[in-house]
Image (cartoon, helix red, strand yellow):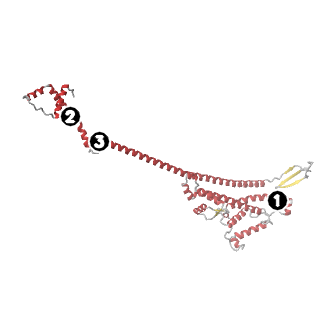
Amino acid sequence: MRKLTLTASTAMGIVIGALGLNILPVRAQMAVVDVKSITQEIKQTELYQDMLSVSQTISSTMNDIKSLVSPITTINSTLGDTSNGSVTQLLQQGFTQISNYQKAAVGAFEQLFDGSNTSMALFHRDVRNAQIRDEHSTSPMHCTALDGGVSTQAAAVQAFSVGAIMGQIHDLRGEAGPGMPSYYGAAQGYASMNQEHISYYCDANDTAANLCAAATTTPDADQQYASLYGSGSYATQAAVNAAKDYAINLIEPVAPAALRGDQLASTQGQEAAVRRRSFNARMSLAQNIVDQQIGMQSPSVPLTSAQQTYLTNTGLPQQTNGSWLQALQIESERRISDVNWNAQLQTMPPASVEREIAIELALNNYLQYQNFKIGLQHTTISATALAEATERDFNPNVRIPVPSMTASGGGTTTTTLLGGAGTTSGSSTPAAP
């Protein structure tokens, strides 16, 4: 838009004012003039041209304004009714509401996360508490193992007592002490053994020979291996007696007669007594080892419920009392073949499994110690057999000089060993004290 001069601006103002204020022409007595000619003159003036240019400029400006306002009107009509407020107000309210929704969503998510974190913290705490409980709580299997261990050790004490008592009786029997068979001679020992067999173990041959009226319920049990190692635990006292009688027939059925009176006091009797004591010691070793094995199988302690359940599951005879050997067998084998123990092992927490491993190691140590004791007995037997074989093979028949025992040193004493018997020649006088 070009600049207007002062004259043109004044003229345009007069025209706009006349049009806008609707000023009426002045009615006065004037001279008659030619309007057309005046109009033509005005159009030809520079002022008129300027006013026309201003008017066109104003019209163009108004058109430009309309072209600018038209899209806004279209937007307003598109947005709808403005009765609830202007577009700016509605947009502001909408954005504010969306912001509020977002703030609420953030707050809700924070609460959700806080609740989730709290729940997970409680869950992990409960899990840890359960772990601590499992690590410090005793499993029923541990109680069962402890009961089995106590029962086993109690049976071991009883087995030792039974074996020791039987060993003392058999030692007196082997020594042919007063009141024992063979005290008055070997014939008494033979008669006693035959009477024992006829009374408790009579068989068909004995019946046919009229030695007994009828065969007993356990014929020849005093000479059968099953009497000693049959079921791991003797069911009755009769079974214990059968094992004892089998051990006697196995080791020393008839003991030699005892040396008594002048027979024992004589020189030959004293030499025979040395050999008899060696014989008794060896027989005592052999007999007491078997007696300990009988004591291991003697029913001496009540079986626990778990041990009885194991006997039921394996199809063994049911019994309320058990022996040391049977208790060891159950504690060793139930962890291999017992279904209940293996099922509970699958559900044990790690701490309980570690305790079970410790119990297994303790049981293994216990069994190793028992094997060590048996090994000591076996080495003793081996040493005894070696000594007996050495003594039997040693039979010198040469003359062995011995130093003089006289005070002056005169005289010599020689000894000839023939078959182990000593003969002395020469003189020997003890030295004066």
Q: Residues within 10 Å of mark 1 (few under 14, many from 20)?
A: some
In terms of secondary structure, where does tag 1 sit?
A: helix
Which of the pair 382/34 is nearer the observer?
A: 34
Q: Amino acid at mark 1?
A: Ala
Q: Are marks 1 and 3 in contact (CB under 8 Å)?
A: no
- In whole angstroms, how far apart are the C-alphas of marks 1 and 3? 136 Å
Marked residue nearer the N-terminal end (3 or 2): 2
Which of the pair 386/121 is nearer the observer?
A: 121
Q: Nearer the viewer, mark 1 or mark 3?
A: 3
Q: Residues within 10 Å of mark 2 (few under 14, many from 20)?
A: few
Q: What's the mark number on residue 87?
A: 3
The answer to whether 265 appears left or right of 380 in the picture is: right
The answer to whether 257 appears left or right of 50 in the picture is: right
The quadrant the N terminus occupies is top left
- In whole angstroms, how far apart are the C-alphas of marks 3 and 2? 25 Å
> What percent of the width, then of the height, locates residue 101?
37, 45
Q: Quadrant of residue 34?
A: top left
Q: Amino acid at mark 3?
A: Val
Q: Amino acid at mark 2?
A: Met
The answer to whether 128 appears left or right of 368 in the picture is: left
On the image, numbered disc 1 is attached to which residue?
A: 273
In terms of secondary structure, where does tag 3 sit?
A: helix
Measuring 82% from the left and 59% from the top, which residue is drawn there?
273
> What percent of the width, then of the height, locates residue 255?
77, 63
On the image, numbered disc 2 is attached to which residue?
A: 62
Marked residue nearer the N-terminal end (1 or 2): 2
Measuring 35% from the left and 43% from the top, which residue is drawn there?
96
Marked residue nearer the N-terminal end (1 or 3): 3
